[in-house]
Image (tube, rainbow, N blue to C red):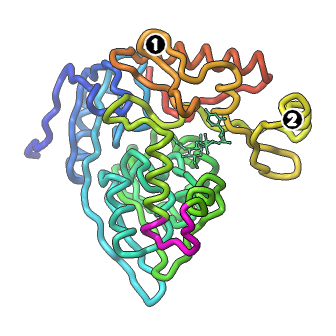
Amino acid sequence: MTHRIQVQENFDLSKFTTMGVLCKASHFVEVHSIDELKEALNFAHQHILNVLILGGGSNLLFIKDYEGLVIHVDLKGIEVIEEDNSSVTIKAAAGEIWHDLVLMAVSNNWAGIENLSLIPGSVGAAPIQNIGAYGVELKDTFISLEALERSTGKVQTFTKEECKFGYRDSIFKNEAKGNYIITSVQLRLQKNGKPTLEYKALKEYLSEREIDNPSIREVSQAVIAIRQSKLPDPDEIGNTGSFFKNPVISATQFKQLEAEYPTIPSYKISDTHIKVPAGWLIEQAGWKGKRKGDAGVHSKQALVLVNHGNATGEEIWNLAHAIQLSVSEKFNISLTPEVNIIG
Ligand code: EPU
């Protein structure tokens, strides 16, 4: 077999993650096709190397150098595979930038993913944590995905049901973790679709500007403006978006908290369970805007941990631990990272 892939050794990964912490991979390769991906997996097998799949690097924290082969999946292409009067099904390769796909949908006036504007990362990573924002999740437009099974080298299709999507969750974070490499995703978007405007911050933004019947483009622009006002731009300051998941607590515990903190925001999940914003808990625990060296808590959104310059992954992780501890002591709630911790 002719070797097209180029494996690099002792490779600096800092520019491949949005947190931007200094970190090296013992081996690194970029793949542009499924054949190259298979070759890379063979290489890892032959050299007995662990494998880590890297998309946009926007949801990863390396807490030490990585011993193994990091495969940067750079598969490209977006195509319309089905279309009728009311909807269009698009297939996007895993290495496409998520926001580019959103912009393409918005410019065609196809509804469904405009609320997911400006989420950093790649298309292939989107299903793994069922990305969500402003009242919409990937699963709402998701049809299926293709993924290479590592043990057989075969490409398999996963339907929406088979992906077992949940809040920031899917089969790929649980029983199928590490077994598959997502190569493409199919979504169905609506041609005359109505935007989803239930999320409070989005509704307020639009009504303050007297935009009563927003177009798909106006919703996308509103989401972009809201995100830019609260979330740090990874090109300017290293971060991985929300560091923790919003915890779900029992209605009983929530009632006790509400008695003590009447302004606590919440989202009802069911009659017995309530989701509370981790950002609020972290702010109440006194962490908003704090920093320890170059590891910090964002000043406008306490759920986001930031790298002010030269923080190490370990320093960010230590800060995360300190936050978990104080939120647990103050509220008896444990925070779970949303970010994948590698180390
Ligand atoms: N809040 C505070 N202090 C803070 C941050 C938030 O009091 O420092 C309060 C806000 O005032 C608001 C509530 O918490 O009442 C919720 O805040 P926000 O609307 O900013 O949303 P979030 O719960 O902090 C979640 C997602 C975000 C997503 C937004 C919008 C998670 C873990 N995070 O954040 O997703 O953009 O909702 O839908 O579910 C991401 O996953 O990386 C991400 C950014």
Residue 294 percent location from the top left of the image: 41, 14
Residue count near mark 1 (Cα–Cα under 10 Å), binned few <14, some 14–19, many ≥20: some
Secondary structure of residue under mark 1: helix
Quadrant in the picture for residue 162: bottom right
Going from N to C along the chain, the mark reached first, 2 or 1, is 2
Q: Is residue 103 above or below residue 41?
A: below
Residue at x 47%, y 39% (from the top left corner): 231
Q: Which residues are magenta?
A: 209-218
Residue 242 percent location from the top left of the image: 53, 36
Residue at x 77%, y 18% (from the top left corner): 330
Residue 214 highlighted magenta (yes or no):
yes
Q: Is residue 130 above or below residue 193?
A: above
Single out the residue that lies furthest toward the left.
2
Question: Mark on residue 315?
Answer: 1
Question: Mark on residue 258?
Answer: 2
Amino acid type, residue under disc 1 in the picture: Glu
Ligand 1 quarter of the rendering = top right
Residue 60 percent location from the top left of the image: 43, 32
- Name the side, left or right, on which 32 lies relative to 212: left
